[in-house]
């Protein structure tokens, strides 16, 4: 049964208290269960975590540990049984489904494993998708999309449709889309899962660089242990033990653990 | 709005899928509209066919299968004091040059007609009574019918009546007062009553002493030797139309008093009622057929649209994850479906009218085989049928799109509707009535599925 953990971006208890007020993401005692026939399966049984503004965190764990569930709860797609989910100062548990959706539209960026670009929109239109939905003026949306595409190296593909792009290129577009509306929090669900190792590293470099450069907070789900040395905090779910590991020193560098 | 742009491009970038969706809607609408139009046309044909022969008569004197004695015409005038009396012989004939075409033959007395069937004209009107009575087989027909038969005034027209060859001579054209009259006299040949009697084997004896116009009439003019007052109408008649003062029961009784056994007087509306009774079962079948077409159309459209929407779930899911509200996704799906529905409905209605034109011939042919020859075979563009097609096309399209659009994750209820459709389909087409075990099985499946959906929702 997964247990809980509490982790500041810095990885220390003292820093945790200090940074709690600056936290972009704060989960406290998150519980979520599913039913499988008559059986009840508790996926999250009191998980807590905190991620400070501008930090990069990684959520790791075996399949079925609850990583995607946690991501859905953080983004407001799903609702926990009971808990407190605070994103950029907003308590999601107090919002209606529609309000959570609108919150997500304005404050959360998504990078999916399979890119999930809208196939019938051009690259530029995909990038400005949320800008248009958020009512950003046409000229400004176009300028922002153009700048982001230049930054991800796809300025010359602005008019192309996603099916003309390679996997790596599509993920670059997805990164640009996730950052276009300047969200407080970027969630990435296995962003390299569908890419070869080399391209995956390039995508991670780009994602990390662009979010850090903008001072955005990034939480990514990953199975790739080799990516953990670049994050500030690692949240490990599963095996009945949840560990919070300091980033930058490899997966073995456990700084704090609770059972 | 990126959603609208995306939807538009989706439709344009998948022309085959879009075309199939439009075709599905169009076929559904077309089937329903065609059957409805054919039915409406057939029902209208019932009315018009009766109307043409009834005219403005308030009552009719009718007999058994052999008709009524022609001598009654004179007796009705002299003994019962009825002023407006019109002998009628009617039947059907096949056109020699176009054996598939059956025309109605209405035998009338031109001097008695003006009060009954204004389109005939009568002496003093458009009808040239001299020609009508002197030319053998003289016939009047509508301009449209003449054009359809390829004849004009002065031409002859070969007919097959009860296997015998007869010849009609077109001496003039009927002048309908309005469109309804024009439809009523479609494929109708108006001839002198004596010609009709001869053609249909109802003539008896010769001579026209009674009116003093016998010399002018054809040799087929009949009289009844047994009649105390022989006249031009002697012989047998299909019926005698009369006009009596409204509500004058004494006049009806006076008529009834002189009628021989086996002959009766009845209100003209009785014929329409009898017609309605006779064709009630057939009309019920037509209605059932229309309902079946509606169900088939609904089935086609619903499944077409549902398939198209379900196919796009991944994109719809992406929308939701990115922050597009349920309402926005729902409206986008409905708007996309509405475009398909509008185009499909427009094509379907047009296709339905075309299909209906062919179908109405089959339906009227069936009516002819089962009941009586329906001369009116044109398609009546019923606003109700067209409106029903539009409501069906748009309604079923939006209905088909609504469920998957709103509940993208809950596939089960959509699939379960197939059980209902399948059962209904089997019953309507194959007459399969589901037994208790089938109902029980379906119930278990549906309840299990609904419970699964309930659990699924709890888990979210």
Image: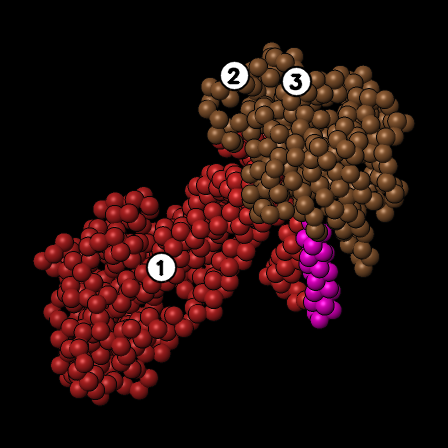
What's the colour of chain B in the image? red
Q: Where's residue B29, x and y in %?
A: 49, 48
Mark 3 and mark 1: Cα distance apart in space: 79 Å
Dot 1 crowding, Cα within 10 Å, few <14, some 14–19, many 20+: many
Q: Main secondary structure of the magenta part?
A: helix
Write down the region rendered in magenta.
B435-460
Residue A70 x/y as whole percent: 74, 40
Which numbered disc flags the more N-terminal residue, 2 or 3?
2
The kind of secondary structure element at disc 2 is helix
Q: Please identify which colour was used for chain A in the image.
A: brown
Residue B286: horizontal and vertical position, in percent?
Answer: 47, 61
Residue that numbered label 1 is attached to: B44
For label 3, the residue is: A213
Could one spot residue B354 in this view of the protein? no
User: How is the protein colored in the picture?
Assistant: by chain
Which residue is tagged 2? A143
Label 1 – label 2 distance at C-alpha: 66 Å
Asked if one can make out residue B435 in the rendered structure from this viewpoint, the answer is yes
How dense is the environment of label 2, judged by Cα within 10 Å: few (below 14), some, or many (20 and up)?
Answer: few
Identify the residue at image location x=65%, y=32%. A22
């Amino acid at each position: 049964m997964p247990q809980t953990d509490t982790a500041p971006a810095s990885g220390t208890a003292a820093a945790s208290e200090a940074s709690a007020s600056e936290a972009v993401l704060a989960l406290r005692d998150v519980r979520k269960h599913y039913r499988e026939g008559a059986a009840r399966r508790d996926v999250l049984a009191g998980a807590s975590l905190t991620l400070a503004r501008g930090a990069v965190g990684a959520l790791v764990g075996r399949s079925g540990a609850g990583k995607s569930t946690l991501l859905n709860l953080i983004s407001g797609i799903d609702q926990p049984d009971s808990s407190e989910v605070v994103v950029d100062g907003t308590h999601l548990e107090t919002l209606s489904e529609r309000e959570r959706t609108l919150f997500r539209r304005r404050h959360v960026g998504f990078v999916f494993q399979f890119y999930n670009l809208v196939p019938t929109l051009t690259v530029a239109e995909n990038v400005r998708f949320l800008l248009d939905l958020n009512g950003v003026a046409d000229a400004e949306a176009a300028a922002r999309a153009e700048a982001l595409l230049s930054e991800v190296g796809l300025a010359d593909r602005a008019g192309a449709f996603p099916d003309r792009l390679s996997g790596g290129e599509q993920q670059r577009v997805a990164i640009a889309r996730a950052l276009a509306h300047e969200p407080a929090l970027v969630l990435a669900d296995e962003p390299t899962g569908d890419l070869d190792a080399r391209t995956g590293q390039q995508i991670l470099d780009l994602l990390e660089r662009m979010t850090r450069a903008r001072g955005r907070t990034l939480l990514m789900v990953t199975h790739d242990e080799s990516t953990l040395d670049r994050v500030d905090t690692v949240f490990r779910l599963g095996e009945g033990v949840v560990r919070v590991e300091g980033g930058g020193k490899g997966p073995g560098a456990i700084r704090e653990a609770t059972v | 709005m990126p959603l609208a742009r995306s939807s538009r491009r989706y439709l344009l970038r998948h022309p085959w899928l879009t075309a199939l969706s439009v075709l599905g809607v169009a076929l559904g609408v077309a089937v329903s509209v065609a059957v409805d139009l054919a039915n409406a046309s057939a029902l209208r044909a019932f009315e018009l066919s009766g109307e043409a022969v009834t005219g403005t008569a308030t009552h009719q004197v009718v007999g058994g299968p052999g008709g009524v004695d022609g001598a009654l015409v004179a007796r009705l005038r002299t003994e019962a004091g009825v002023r407006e009396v019109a002998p009628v012989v009617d039947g059907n004939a096949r056109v020699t040059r176009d054996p598939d075409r059956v025309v109605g033959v209405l035998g009338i007395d031109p001097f008695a007609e003006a009060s009954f069937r204004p389109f005939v004209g009568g002496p003093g009107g458009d009808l040239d009574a001299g020609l009508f009575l002197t030319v053998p087989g003289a016939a009047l027909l509508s301009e449209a019918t003449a054009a359809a038969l390829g004849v004009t005034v002065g031409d002859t027209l070969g007919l097959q009546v009860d296997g015998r060859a007869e010849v009609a001579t077109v001496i003039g054209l009927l002048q309908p007062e309005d469109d309804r009259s024009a439809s009523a006299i479609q494929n109708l040949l108006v001839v002198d009553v004596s010609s009709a009697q001869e053609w249909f084997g109802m003539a008896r004896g010769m001579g026209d002493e009674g009116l003093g116009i016998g010399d002018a009439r054809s040799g087929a003019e009949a009289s009844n030797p047994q009649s105390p007052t022989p006249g031009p109408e002697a012989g047998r008649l299909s019926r005698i139309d009369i006009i009596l003062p409204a509500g004058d029961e004494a006049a009806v009784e006076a008529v009834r008093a002189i009628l021989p056994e086996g002959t009766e007087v009845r209100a003209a509306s009785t014929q329409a009622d009898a017609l309605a009774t006779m064709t009630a079962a057939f009309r019920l079948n037509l209605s059932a057929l229309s309902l079946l077409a509606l169900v088939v159309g609904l089935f086609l459209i619903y499944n077409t649209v549902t398939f198209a929407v379900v196919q796009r779930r991944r994109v719809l899911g992406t929308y939701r994850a990115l922050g597009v509200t349920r309402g926005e996704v729902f409206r986008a799906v409905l708007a996309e479906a509405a475009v398909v529905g509008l185009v499909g409905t427009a094509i379907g209605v047009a296709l339905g009218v075309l299909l209906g034109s062919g179908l109405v011939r089959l339906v009227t042919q069936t009516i002819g085989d089962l009941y009586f020859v329906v001369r009116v075979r044109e398609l009546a563009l019923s606003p109700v049928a067209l409106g029903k097609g539009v409501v069906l096309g748009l309604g079923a399209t939006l209905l088909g799109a609504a469920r998957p659009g709103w509940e993208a994750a809950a596939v089960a209820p959509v699939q379960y509707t197939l059980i209902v459709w399948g059962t209904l389909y089997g019953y309507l087409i194959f007459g399969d009535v589901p037994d208790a075990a089938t109902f029980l099985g379906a119930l278990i499946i549906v309840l299990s599925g609904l419970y699964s959906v309930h659990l699924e929702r709890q888990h979210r």
